Image (cartoon, helix red, strand yellow):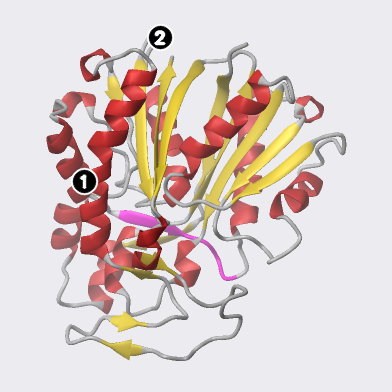
């Protein structure tokens, strides 16, 4: 049995953070500088009382409407996020009730970042191929904006909030090929939020600023940009070669590369590292920024709309995420 993506939709919050606003807050960065380096013009930011689950529910409603999906046909729900409503219960349980899905279904939260969509596709495929489910609702959603310090200009220019919804089934528009994954927990400290979990439940209130005025605090998201970039460029060629081999393909066989949409700077380095022609490397971060686990599905939607993905298009998706985790998968449209 094969597993397919039957449909993909997404949702972005109404609030917008543009480069002009950021330039006012950080005068040393002008609009042109931000856009030229990152390729990002706008980020959509969740409201104060709007959670990742709220975004996921709206993305799912868009999916149901766009593809005329009957809710009672869904027999499993996966929710990939790092921004859960509560420590417990499982957020996918809350989503099941809000979407009025069948109570004769399984649910599962998947706690992963930028590599989350690829890993979740593999899990969904496993459920289908094993005969455990026939229609898996795969949701990704993130609200990193809630974990960023207001003076963290680096991360605030990169990350946006958003959600996606995909239906994985026994038939559809894209067959899900074989995947490849990797993990190296030694890199966990390079992208971390230290408080709020069981290790440090209470705020540590240890805010400090470096010589450049950048905030450092255990109570807000911290990212070591240079280390993340080095690990990304080291792992991407490795996982690309592995996943292509598993699918019996070479890089020349791939029609379109839809990788994790971090930003223009990283995309350019990845493309050059893999020696992929510019016209085969898809970019979609101008109006949304880095939405973590939702970047690949959002980019797939845009590529389908603008004709970059046609019938018989072979798409390679690769992503690297915090943890460290990384993964690759091939989609056959």
Q: Residue at (74%, 42%) from the top-left corner?
A: 107
Q: Which one is earlier in the sequence, the residue at label 2 or at label 1?
A: 1
Q: Secondary structure at mark 2?
A: loop
Q: Position of residue 323 (x, y in %)?
A: 42, 56
Q: Residue at (61%, 13%) from the top-left corner?
A: 171
Q: Is residue 192 visible?
A: yes
Q: Quadrant of residue 8?
A: top right
Q: CA distance from mark 2 to mark 1?
A: 31 Å
Instruction: Reply above or below: 110 against 299.
Output: below
**Residue ID for mark 2:** 311
Q: Secondary structure at mark 1?
A: helix
Instruction: Reply above or below: 193 against 182.
Output: below
**Residue ID for mark 1:** 233
Q: Is residue 44 magenta?
A: yes
Q: Position of residue 100 (x, y in %)?
A: 82, 41
Could you tell whether 129 is left or right of 4 in the image?
A: right
Could you tell whether 50 is left or right of 327 in the image?
A: right
Q: Is residue 141 magenta?
A: no
Circles 2 and 1, Cβ within 8 Å, touching? The answer is: no
Q: Which residues are magenta?
A: 42-48
Residue at the outermost right position: 103
Q: Residue at (36%, 52%) from the top-left corner?
A: 290
Q: Residue at (76%, 60%) from the top-left corner?
A: 89
Residue at the outermost top position: 312
Q: Quadrant of residue 50?
A: bottom right
Could you tell whether 116 is left or right of 131 in the image?
A: left
């Amino acid at each position: 049995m094969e597993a397919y993506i039957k449909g993909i939709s997404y949702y972005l919050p109404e609030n917008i953070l543009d480069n002009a606003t950021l330039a006012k807050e950080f005068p040393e960065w002008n609009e042109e500088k931000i856009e030229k380096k990152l390729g990002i013009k706008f980020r959509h930011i969740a409201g104060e009382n709007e959670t990742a689950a709220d975004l996921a529910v709206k993305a799912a409603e868009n999916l149901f409407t766009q593809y005329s999906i009957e809710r009672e046909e869904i027999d499993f729900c996966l929710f990939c996020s790092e921004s859960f409503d509560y420590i417990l219960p499982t957020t996918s349980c809350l989503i099941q009730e809000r979407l009025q899905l069948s109570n004769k279904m399984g649910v599962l939260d998947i706690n992963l970042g930028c590599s989350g969509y690829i890993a979740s596709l593999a899990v969904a495929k496993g459920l289908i191929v094993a005969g455990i489910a026939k229609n898996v609702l795969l949701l990704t959603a993130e609200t990193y904006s809630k974990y960023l310090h207001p003076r963290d200009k680096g991360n605030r220019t990169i990350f946006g909030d958003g959600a996606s919804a995909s239906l994985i089934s026994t038939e559809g528009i894209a067959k899900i090929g074989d995947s490849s994954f990797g993990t190296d927990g030694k890199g966990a400290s390079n992208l971390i939020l230290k408080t709020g979990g069981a290790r440090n439940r209470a705020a540590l209130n240890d805010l400090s600023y470096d010589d450049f005025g950048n905030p450092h605090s255990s109570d807000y998201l911290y990212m070591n940009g240079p280390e993340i970039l080095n690990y990304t460029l080291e792992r991407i060629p490795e996982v690309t070669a592995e996943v292509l081999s598993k699918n019996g393909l070479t890089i020349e066989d791939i029609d379109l590369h839809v990788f994790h949409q971090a930003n223009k700077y990283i995309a350019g380095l990845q493309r050059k590292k893999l020696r992929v022609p510019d016209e085969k490397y898809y970019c979609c971060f101008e109006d949304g920024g880095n939405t973590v686990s939702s970047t690949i599905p959002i980019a797939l939607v845009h590529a389908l709309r603008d004709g970059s993905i046609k019938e018989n298009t072979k798409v390679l998706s690769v992503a690297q995420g915090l943890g460290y985790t990384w993964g690759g998968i091939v989609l056959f449209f």
